[in-house]
Image: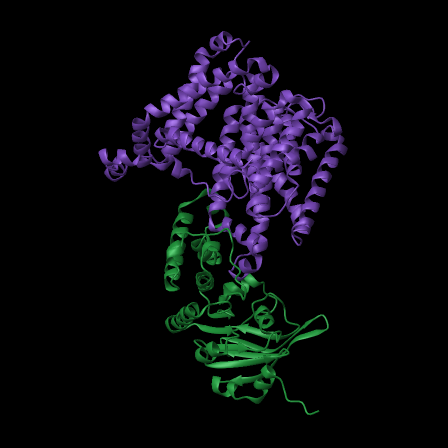
Chain colours: A purple, B green
Amino acid sequence: MAVASQTLTTRWSSLRAWLARAWHPYRPVPLLGWLAAILVAVVIERAIGAPVARALGMSRVPALFGFIIMLKKPELLFSALLYVSLIYLLPIALVARFTVRPANRIAGELIGYSLTASFLIHLSVLYAALFLWSGENDYRELVAKLAMIAVITTLSLNVVNGYMGEFSCSHPGFMALGAYAASVITILLFVDDNLLGEALLPPELGPFMFPISLIIGGVVAAAGALMVAIPSFRTRGDYLAIISLAFMFIVKSLFENLEVFGGPRGLANQPDYASLTTIFLWTIASIWVINNFVRSTMGKALNAVRDGEMAADAMTVNTRRTKMTAFLFAAFWAGVAGGLLAHVIRYINPDTFGIRRLAEVLAMVYLGGLNAVAGSIVGGVGFVIMSEALRPLEILKWIMIPVLLILLMIFRPTGLIAFREFEPEKFLRPKVESNDQGKHPPQPVQAVGDRP
Amino acid sequence: MALLQVDDMTHYFGGLRAVHNYSLQIEPGELRGLIGPNGAGKTTIFNLITGRYTPTEGEIRLDGTSLIGLKPYEIASLGLGRTFQNLRLWRHMTVLEHVKMARYSRLSYGLSGALFNTRKRREQEQDTAEEASRLLKRVGADQYADQVVTSLPYGAQRRVELARALAIEPKVLFLDEPTAGMNPEELRQIMEIIRAIHADLGLAIFLIEHRMRFVMELCEIIQTLDFGEVIAEGTPDEIRNDERVIDAYLGKDIEI
């Protein structure tokens, strides 16, 4: 027994050593290099994906990195793996590895030119890759949209459950408020609907009004949050959890009984305004704003309140206002996410925002990691992809996911990435490998100085 | 009127009288001590003055402003800094962030600055960080600036707490057992730091302490508390020889 475990550990450590060696050439690859490599892989897929898939015996291009095919038709396991390696892994590895130098140079010049410009260029490359990838079929587009909305939801809940350290369960309620408010506005104004009457404004104005209706949705959600906060912020911990859970059910039954908004049958006919671009922009905006907030001293006050309210008070922090602001802020983003969701699936009913949604959002937050913006991004995207990829398992999926969460709780109780600050400007910087530095003394830094 | 003036403060916890007719005057630049056996009500007095509890009776004025009914953070913003008996540091924050946090009420960039990372916010955060580093240097903890507090040695944690209290730019500084749990070397350091900030900033300091030698050496005037009442007030020498103080600490001889 002891011998077996020893060989296992040596094997494990040799595997790790091998991985480290394999990873070594990729260490100087900057973010720009990775993004460009992903873009190349996606372009390759769009160009020759279909014939390659057919040649490997699959009827069409695997939608989600082959996961669904592997689970549905295990006999195609190797074809799916081969496809993923050929179309994604190999091109990404090659491009990333052999563009190290130009990518670093461009990244250095960009950041020397302006941080904002560098940001925008990185984002455009990311967006181009996402756009091409999800352009392959409608299913991919839906998954991409849901993943981005999940990021907004997860981030906003992380502000309360992670940064502020309360256990709030009212998030689906805020999403419902946002979803209904935004839907009612767009349907009322731009759609001829049985329930809400004829369009009041010409539909051409719709896409311009959409952001406004989302913001109104967010504000309605924040108003709902104020209603929870006023009575419940005198309590903490379990009590707040119970009150916020009650709020979620109140909102749900409110919409079940409001026949104006369709009652339990819900609202349909939302106009198709939530394009990939719109959602992408909203997601980036939410990440930027929330990250700004939690990195400021005002946002850090949340951590101070969480880790010692008495000390926060003694250090001039207005604890009540801090908590209130953060809670309303989180609810606002939940409302925006709800509004976007309503316009993606283009049908909502009170059940959309029930206990199942709550379980999902909580799972995303705790999977990704508390008190970390990067964690929430990983958690939101990871959970949506996982839950789509496991869809062929049908009912077994709802056993698999909880099991995964239990394993996570055992091995990484705070989530994948927790208590880490997210500094995007750090990723934008070029990475120069140490032995490379000798040949090219910190070139990018010089470029910074040279610029007027 | 004194800088900090407490008149006839009485406080009940339910039916228990924790503090009775307590009065205090602290002048600018004064270094005062508060001693007393366990449970005498020392920390309660701190908590009453700093606004944790509202006194049942009595008046508290800082620089002429009444503190009765104000929230703790308002009292702190008026210039009353404090440290805690058992360190109350924020376990997930770095040392620098601790000190920056205490400048909270001086930040004026508002919610829009926090959300949209405006120029004003960047400038203010920068200034605050510089101010915080300066204070950390003063207490000799600047080498820990980017570390999480929980990884610091105990004495350093105490010094960080002191720097944090100084960051609110207090007029009066309350220290609740600043030497609790310290070894002799750390004790010497903290004593020097307290002396230094007292001398440099001309700060009024009011401290609770258990180590007699420390109080006697440091403070100009000492109050002794027993069962919520001041039983003696005076210079270290007077306190040392006071009959009632000795009785309170060592117990009285009882004739049987």
- x and y percent of residue A249 in the render? 72, 38
Residue projecting furthest to the bottom: B255
Query: Which one is nearer the viewer's eye here, A322 or A426?
Result: A426
Q: Quadrant of residue A158?
A: top right
Is residue A40 toward the left or the right of residue A109 in the image? right
Q: Look at 48% across and 84% down and name the residue there.
A: B236
Measured as percent of width and height from the top left, residue B210 is found at 53, 75
On screen, residue B207 above or below A418: below
The residue lying toward the viewer, choosing from B147 and A8, is A8
Image x and y of residue A449, in percent: 25, 40
Question: Which residue is rendered at x = 59% and y = 65% of the image?
Answer: B70
Q: How many labels does the image show?
A: 0
Q: Quadrant of the C terminus of chain B?
A: bottom right
Q: Can residue A205 be seen in this view?
A: no
B249 lies above or below A218:
below
Q: Position of residue A315 (x, y in %)?
A: 51, 60
Residue A164 appears in the rendering = yes
